[in-house]
Image (spheres, helix red, strand yellow):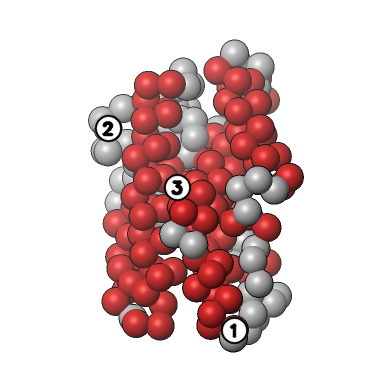
């Protein structure tokens, strides 16, 4: 079985690429600015529910590069999942650096400057700009990494747990929501990050012939 995303000449993959380019242009030209700002203002106004604030903080912290890289290393160590672990690790690192470069030097979209008015959190909210020391916002590194995990883990589970590959996409959805909720990103940032992470993981998976590895496993 070859997932359509690992065929880089397929129509869905082409749509992903074009979507990211179009979204980048819209953000760069400030077309989405009013929508983005009104959305984060809304999320600032609903903060204050302690349980919800804490849950959103935990979810956003899970998307930190350290935890997800550690997760991919564990998968890499296990012999049966070594190939998927390698693709995941490379995709996470490339996605983090790529998103950092784009939001730091290509797309002019500063982070929201609103103060989080919700409950006091155990630790400061992670910004995820340490790779290149910039403070840009598009695309979101957390959303990029969450999409990488969802695509590759979902692909690995697609044979034994067909429905699981769809359920696992709840992770990037919640991760993206949490980044907007804690006022670290605008909606377009997390949408762009999700598309960017999905595309990047597909490219790396294709180059490392991940689909052939699973085809051999099924034989």
Regarding mark 3 in the picture, which secondary structure is present there?
A: helix
In percent of the image, x 27 and y 32: which residue is there? 132
Which residue position is annotated with label 3?
A: 142
Q: How far apart are the alpha carbons under marks 1 and 2?
A: 41 Å
| 56 up-or-down from 117: above or below | below
Left or right, 207 with reference to 187: left
Q: Disc 1 vs disc 2: which is toward the camera?
A: 1
Left or right, 190 with reference to 135: right
Q: Position of residue 72 (x, y in %)?
A: 36, 66
Inspect this view and state whether residue 216 appears. yes
| Disc 2 residue crowd, few under 14, some 14–19, many 20+, Cα 10 Å | some
Which quarter of the rendering shows the N terminus? Answer: bottom right
Q: Are marks 1 and 3 in contact (CB under 8 Å)?
A: no
Left or right, 87 with reference to 202: left
Regarding mark 2 in the picture, which secondary structure is present there?
A: loop
| 161 up-or-down from 199: above or below | below
Q: How far apart are the alpha carbons under marks 1 and 3?
A: 33 Å
Regarding mark 1 in the picture, which secondary structure is present there?
A: helix
Q: Position of residue 197 (x, y in %)?
A: 51, 47
In percent of the image, x 54 and y 34: which residue is there? 189
Q: Are marks 3 and 2 in contact (CB under 8 Å)?
A: no
Furthest residue in direction right, as rendered? 11
| Disc 3 residue crowd, few under 14, some 14–19, many 20+, Cα 10 Å | many
Which residue position is annotated with label 1?
A: 218
Locate residue 122: give its quadrant: bottom left
In percent of the image, x 41 and y 77: which residue is there? 81
């Amino acid at each position: 079985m070859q997932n359509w995303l690992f065929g880089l000449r397929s129509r869905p993959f082409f749509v992903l690429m074009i979507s990211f380019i179009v979204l980048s242009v819209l953000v760069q030209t400030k077309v989405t600015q009013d929508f983005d700002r009104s959305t984060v203002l809304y999320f600032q106004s609903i903060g204050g529910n302690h349980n919800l604030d804490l849950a959103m903080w935990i979810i956003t912290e899970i998307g930190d590069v350290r935890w997800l890289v550690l997760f991919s290393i564990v998968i890499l160590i296990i012999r049966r999942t070594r190939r998927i672990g390698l693709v995941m690790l490379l995709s996470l690192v490339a996605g983090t650096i790529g998103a950092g470069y784009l939001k730091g030097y290509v797309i002019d979209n500063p982070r929201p400057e609103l103060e989080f008015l919700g409950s006091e959190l155990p630790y400061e909210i992670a910004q995820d700009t340490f790779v290149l020391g910039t403070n840009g916002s598009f695309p979101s590194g957390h959303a990029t990494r969450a999409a990488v995990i969802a695509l590759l883990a979902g692909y690995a589970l697609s044979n034994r747990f067909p429905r699981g590959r769809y359920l696992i996409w709840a992770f990037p959805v919640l991760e993206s929501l949490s980044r907007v909720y804690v006022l670290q990103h605008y909606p377009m940032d997390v949408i762009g990050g999700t598309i960017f992470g999905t595309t990047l993981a597909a490219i790396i998976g294709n180059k490392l012939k991940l689909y052939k590895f699973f085809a051999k496993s099924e034989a």
